Amino acid sequence: MQDIRIGHGYDVHRLEEGRRLVLGGVSIPFERGLLGHSDADVLIHALIDALLGALALGDIGAHFPDTDGRYAGIDSRKLLRQAVALVHGKGWSVGNVDVTVCAEAPRLSPYIGQMRRHLADDFGVSLDAVSVKATTEEGLGVTGQGAGIAATAVALLVRVGE
């Protein structure tokens, strides 16, 4: 039997004027961007939490605190690659990941392929091991009212050598 671990992650950020919108490492043309200490990429932040959670290593804030100036405005893909290196250092590899982004706008389908390619590269896995989906919340809640964007993610880790 394979030694596997599953982790779940969630993140949400408020949309603000004057910020760039970045999701899955892709800059998306939109009149508002996500507010946060880093580039506020909720998709990647949810994935980092899923990776860390699978190994009971805490959450993104424990490893990349928003009180640390080194992470101000940082590209979240850099943080993801550090989290992947930590996973590999513990003797695990990414089997597959699945992410859902909740946003009323903008329409994300034109960017999903590029997001998947970025993530597959950062994880060192094939494209078919990375799923990214987008949905709306039909006017309900923070994301449905257009005040923010949220993402939920699951990651399957496999023990290296199993």
Image: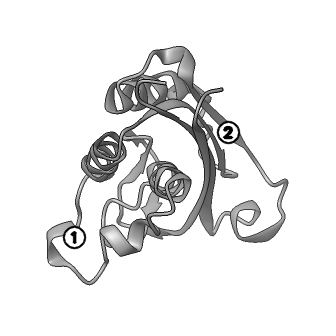
Q: Secondary structure at mark 1?
A: loop
Q: CA distance from mark 1 to mark 2?
A: 27 Å
Residue drawn 46% across the image and 57% down it: 52
Residue drawn 33% across the image and 59% down it: 39
What residue type is disc 1 on?
Ala
Q: The N terminus lies in which quarter of the figure?
A: top right
Q: Can I make out residue 36 in this image?
A: no
The answer to which of 2 and 36 lies nearer the viewer is 2
Residue drawn 51% across the image and 62% down it: 56
The location of residue 29, given as percent across then percent down, is 42, 42
Q: Secondary structure at mark 2?
A: strand
The location of residue 44, given as percent across then percent down, is 45, 49
Provide the residue designation for mark 2. Answer: 134
What residue type is disc 2 on?
Ala
**Figure check: 34 above or below 65:** above
Specify few, some or many for label 2: CA neighbours under 10 Å numbering under 14, 14-19, or 20 or more: some
Provide the residue designation for mark 1. Answer: 72
Specify few, some or many for label 1: CA neighbours under 10 Å numbering under 14, 14-19, or 20 or more: some
- The number of numbered badges drawn on the structure is 2
The location of residue 55, given as percent across then percent down, is 49, 55
Left or right, 141 with reference to 153: right
Tell me, yes or no, whether the two marked residues, 1 and 2, touch with CB atoms within 8 Å. no
